[in-house]
Amino acid sequence: MKPRVLRSCLAMTAASLICGVIAAQELSPATYDRLRERIDVTPDELRWQQVSWLSFWDGVVAAQRQDQPIFYWIYFGDPRGGC
């Protein structure tokens, strides 16, 4: 691994650990409500469920009918790559 990349990874790891220690709080009724507000899923985050998804073949047929191209993206493995 290159020294520059190694330094960057170490810096990000250290920052994550420091932020995790600072953000740790004891659970109480007051902190529970704030934490639940941050964790709960909002309706805006569920909008993807309202999309009328098609099967691959139904998409092909619909694209041909409308004379439109198809963007088909498939990826195996972790999309974040290796770090």
Image (cartoon, grey):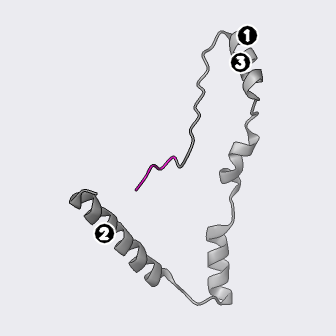
Of the residues under marks 2 and 1, which one precedes in the sequence?
Answer: 2
Q: Amino acid at mark 3?
A: Val
Q: Is residue 81 toward the left or the right of residue 55 in the image?
A: left
Q: Amino acid at mark 1?
A: Arg
Q: Amino acid at mark 2?
A: Ala
Looking at the rendered image, the disc whose residue lies closer to the viewer, 2 or 1, is 2
Q: Is residue 1 toward the left or the right of residue 26 in the image?
A: left
* Vertical position of residue 62 compared to residue 33: above or below: above
User: CB of mark 3 within 8 Å of CB of mark 2?
Assistant: no
Q: Residue 80: x, y in percent?
A: 47, 50
Measure the C-alpha gap from mark 3 to mark 2.
47 Å
Q: Residue 27: x, y in percent?
A: 63, 88
Q: Residue at x 73, y 37 (%)?
A: 51
Residue that lies at the very extreme toward the left in this rendered image:
3
User: CB of mark 3 within 8 Å of CB of mark 1?
Assistant: no
Q: Which mark is residue 60?
A: 3
* Vertical position of residue 47 compared to residue 68: above or below: below
The residue carrying mark 1 is 65
Measure the C-alpha gap from mark 3 to mark 1.
9 Å
The residue carrying mark 2 is 11
User: CB of mark 2 within 8 Å of CB of mark 1?
Assistant: no
Please report the bounds of the magenta region as a residue range.
Answer: 79-83
- Element on which disc 1 rests: helix
Measure the C-alpha gap from mark 2 to mark 1.
53 Å
Of the residues under marks 3 and 2, which one precedes in the sequence?
Answer: 2
Q: Residues within 10 Å of mark 1 (few under 14, many from 20)?
A: few
The C terminus appears in which quarter of the rendering?
Answer: bottom left
Looking at the rendered image, the disc whose residue lies closer to the viewer, 3 or 1, is 3
Q: Residues within 10 Å of mark 2 (few under 14, many from 20)?
A: few
Q: Residue at x 44, y 83 (%)?
A: 22
Q: Residues within 10 Å of mark 3 (few under 14, many from 20)?
A: some
